[in-house]
Image: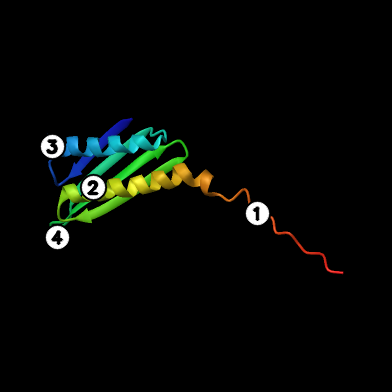
Amino acid sequence: MQMNITGKNIEITSAIRNHIESKFKKLEKWQVEITGCQASFSEQPNKQKKFEATVTIPKGQLVASAIHDDLYAAINEVEQKLERQLNKLRHKPESRRADKPEVEEEETE
C-alpha cells in the first residue's frame, strides 16, 4: 500500500508518521485490496487539528475526516470511520436478502 502523508501548518514528526502508519496497517485486516492512501492534517485557526484520509480501493475511494483538539484523537477517529466503511463494504454482499422466505397462499373454496 502506497501512503502519502502531508501536513499544513504542522511539522510531520516521526512519532506522528509512525502513529498514522500503524493505524492504517490495521485496515488491512478487512481483506479489501487497498491500493493507496492519502492522509493530510492541518491546524485550524481555532487551534483544532483537522485530519483527513482518503483510501483508494479498486471500486472507488473511502473518505473520512475529523476535527479534534488532539491530533492523535483525530487520527483514531478517522481510523474508526474508515474501519466502519470497510466493514460495510466487505459484508454488504452477505447482508442482501437473496433467500427471501416464500409466503404460502391458502386456497379458498
Classify mark 4: helix, strand or loop. loop
CA distance for labels 4 and 2 = 21 Å
Q: From the image, tell me which residue sits under label 4.
A: 46
User: In this rendering, is residue 80 above or below 28?
Assistant: below
Residue furthest right as drawn:
109
* Distance of label 3 from label 1 (alpha carbons): 54 Å
Residue 15 disc label: 3
Question: Which badge, 4 or 1, is on the more N-terminal residue?
Answer: 4
- At numbered mark 1, what does the secondary structure look like: helix, strand or loop? loop
Q: Nearer the viewer, residue 21 or 47?
A: 21
Residue named by callout 2:
76
The mark that comes first in sequence, 2 or 1, is 2
Residue 19 placement: quadrant: top left
- Label 4 and label 1: CA atoms lie apart by 56 Å
The residue at which mark 1 appears reads as 101
Estimate how packed mark 3 is, as few (under 14), some (14 to 19) or many (20 or more) residues with alpha carbons within 10 Å. few
Task: Give the Cα separation between the discs numbered 2 and 3.
Answer: 14 Å
Mark-to-mark CA distance, 4 and 3? 24 Å
Q: Residue at x 12, y 57 (%)?
A: 47
Amino acid on which disc 2 is placed: Asn
> If you read the primary sequence from the N terminus, does the residue marked by circle 2 or circle 3 appear first?
3
